[in-house]
Structures are given as structure tokens and as C-alpha cells.
Image (cartoon, grey):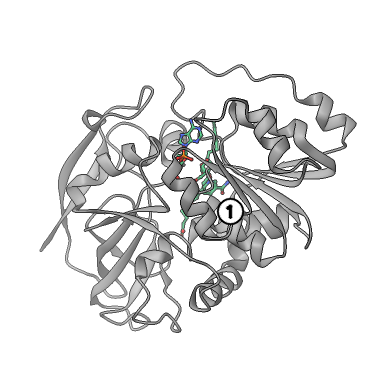
Amino acid sequence: MVTAKVWVLKKHFEGFPQTSDFEMKQEALANLKDGELLLESVFLSVDPYMRPYSKRDMKEGDVMIGTQVARIVESKNPAFAVGAFVVANRGWRTHFISDGKDLNLLPESWPESLPRSLALGTIGMPGLTAYFGLFEVCKMKPGETVLVNAAAGAVGSVVGQLAKIGGCKVVGCAGSDSKVAYLKKIGFDEAFNYKTVTSLDETLRKASPDGYDCFFDNVGGEFASIAINHMKKYGRIAVCGAISQYNDTVPQKGPYIQFPMIFNELSMKGFIVTSWYNRREEGVKALLKWVLEGKLKYHEQVTERFENMPAAFIGMLKGENLGKAIIKV
Ligand SMILES: NC(=O)C1=CN([C@@H]2O[C@H](COP(=O)(O)OP(=O)(O)OC[C@H]3O[C@@H](n4cnc5c(N)ncnc54)[C@H](OP(=O)(O)O)[C@@H]3O)[C@@H](O)[C@H]2O)C=CC1
Ligand SMILES: CCCCC/C=C\CC(=O)/C=C/C=C/C=C/[C@@H](O)CCCC(=O)O
């Protein structure tokens, strides 16, 4: 019998999560029935959505939500071979049983040389968020100017590079000078540290005096309220996330945004990547191709050991990651 280690939400977060909000438990797994598979997590993801979703979807004592790349270690299901790798959405756990219906096999064309952890980042949910957010929500066109915040992160770093591949000018921001240097290295036309600029308004104007056609907003809050005033006529805003607000104990009061929305007849659309999961294969295929062609660079912030998941999650929320935050079990 296999015993899984799991991380449960011991106490709902108040402000920034604390390691004391989590508790690691052991879970004895039953023997497989016909049609079932036993899998071991090889890589696990920590993502910002877990913070707001934990409040909305979880109760104390639940296993933390999340995805993993897992390897099939035992199979009583002829459709899945031992040794194959999948993406699963089974939370913060080292082992689990599945009937195969909730598993996404990694593409057969996945080369051995490519880290399988990318299926949780650049060639996974964050990369797909960038792909569909840019092409379907922003409807980016060649020659346009794209603004993206949290640009050195899992989603933002893909947004900027896809926009360059799509023939756009790209402006990005991040919270450290080393991240800004990384943005310039991966092709951003303009990049700045939003924590150290004296005036965000002036910085946005200087980076693109004519304004922005597309704003891929990962952050929300005051940044978004200022950026919206720099949109061009008929500009489009993809409201991807609001990480500046996830850990607030008191809701922020943002400035009035209806004027630029109305006067510039802006389109502003919130979206969730899973709305395009019927086209997941198309996105994964495109992202994999660009990575293999060297057009889409990636960086992973890898934390070793399952025991360090809470620290990795908290660190990501505090901006300690460059690129996708990953735990290597
Ligand atoms: N709508 C959807 O379907 C999806 C939405 N998202 C959203 O996209 C955004 C980015 O996610 P992801 O790329 O996975 O995360 P990242 O890898 O970018 O990690 C989060 C980053 O957010 C930045 N950040 C944290 N707090 C603040 C703050 N107060 N103000 C500004 N920036 C902050 C930090 O970078 P920095 O150094 O720049 O401060 C941190 O590294 C999140 O809002 C997330 O919720 C993600 C996936 C799907
Ligand atoms: C202040 C409130 C903000 C609400 C918006 C919160 C978060 C936006 C966001 O980050 C959404 C992310 C959604 C990700 C979905 C992932 C899972 O469904 C797992 C995907 C499954 C898979 O990859 O197979």
C-alpha cells in the first residue's frame, strides 16, 4: 500500500499566507481497481489563483488545490502505460489514484531534452493564458503596442514574447532590476521596475508616447487605474488577474476608470484560461513549437522538496520568483 504526503489548508489565509496556515498529512492509498492508475507527482505548481480560489472554493482541512506533472507508476488501465507523464489537477500531493479521465498526457512530440515541468508553465496553463489572452481577448495585431505587468512571471514573460513574435512593440514591468534586465534579454522593447519609478504615469508615457493598443493586466489595483489612461482609441484590456489585491485584508479603493473607458471606447474583458481548454491542444502545440525553435525562452524558479511547497507559494506571492515557480519533489 502506498502512503501519499499531502498539504492541507489548516487555516484560511488572512493577508499573506503563513506557513502555519498549512499542515502536511499522510494519506493511505487503496490498492488499484480495474481501470485505475497510481501516479507519483514529479513536479508541482504554485500559482497566484490558489490564493483567491482557496477563499472561494476551499474549506479548512481540504488538500490545497493545484496541478502537477505526474508519472504513472502502476496501471490497471490499458489506455495508460507505466512510465508515461501527464498533467493532472489533483492538488498538493505526492501520490494519487486516477481513473484516467482527469489526466492530460504530455504530447508524444515532447523531447526528452525539454524539462517536463514546462507543462505547468510556459507550455501549460500560464502559457495558454498568455496565448489565448493575447490572441483571443486582446486580439493583438502586428505593429501594435502591448503593455504587460508582472511581466517577468509565468504568464507575463510569455505574453511579452508572443507579442514580439506577433510583430508588436512590448512594454513590461516587474518588481526588481534583475527582472527588468531579464525582460530586456528576452526581447521586451521597454521594461521598468514599477517599485522604483518616481511616476508610473510618466514612465508609461515615456515608454510609449502614443499609448497602448493592448494592456494585458495581471496586477489590477492602482497600476491598472493609471495604465487605463494610457490606452489608445479602441484599445483592448485583457483583465487576466489582480495579484495586487489577492492578499489584501481591506479592499483597495481604486480611482474612477469610467472616463477613459467611455471616452476611448475601450474594450475590457476578464477571462479564465479554462474557457479555451477545448483548444488546449492547439495552444500547447504552438507554444511547444516556439520553445523548440528558440523563439520562446523560459525561466523556472525551482524549489526542491515537497516539504517546501508552502514557502515556495508564499515566496511567489511576494515576488521572489523569476519565471514559473515550480516545486521539484
Ligand atoms: N485569468 C486566468 O485564467 C489566469 C490568470 N492568472 C493571473 O495572472 C497573474 C500572473 O500570474 P503568474 O504569471 O502565474 O504569476 P507570476 O509568476 O507572475 O508570479 C506572481 C508575480 O506577481 C507579482 N506581484 C506580486 N504581488 C504584486 C503586487 N502587489 N503588485 C504588482 N505585482 C505583484 C510578482 O512579480 P513582480 O516582481 O513583478 O512584483 C510575482 O512574482 C496573476 O494575477 C494570476 O492570478 C494566471 C493564470 C491564469
Ligand atoms: C481579487 C479577485 C481576483 C479573482 C481572479 C483570480 C485569479 C485569476 C486567475 O489567476 C485564474 C487562474 C485560473 C487557473 C485555472 C487553473 C486550474 O483550473 C488548473 C488547470 C488544469 C490544468 O492545467 O489541467
Which quarter of the figure has residue 106? bottom left
The residue carrying mark 1 is 273
Secondary structure type for disc 1: helix
Where residue 261 sits in the image (x, y, percent)?
82, 32
Q: Estimate the x, y position of residue 220 in percent, counting from the top left.
A: 60, 33
Q: Residue at x 37, y 42 (%)?
A: 316
Left or right, residue 267 beside residue 207: right
Residue 148: image location, x then y, percent: 62, 46
Q: Is residue 222 visible?
A: yes
Left or right: where does residue 85 sit relative to residue 237? Answer: left
Q: Give the quadrant of residue 17.
A: top left
Residue 8 rendering spot, x and y as whole percentages: 25, 40
Residue drawn 29% across the image and 61% down it: 43
Tell me the residue at 22%/48% (across/down). 6
Q: Residue at x 16, y 43 (%)?
A: 25
Amino acid marked by disc 1 = Val
* 80 in relation to 307, above or below: below
Q: Is residue 153 visible?
A: no
- Please tell me in which quadrant of the rendered image residue 207 appears: top right
Quadrant housing the C terminus: bottom left
Front in this rendered view, residue 235 or 273: 235
Q: Nearer the viewer, residue 32 or 282?
A: 282
Q: Is mark 1 within 8 Å of ligand 1?
A: yes
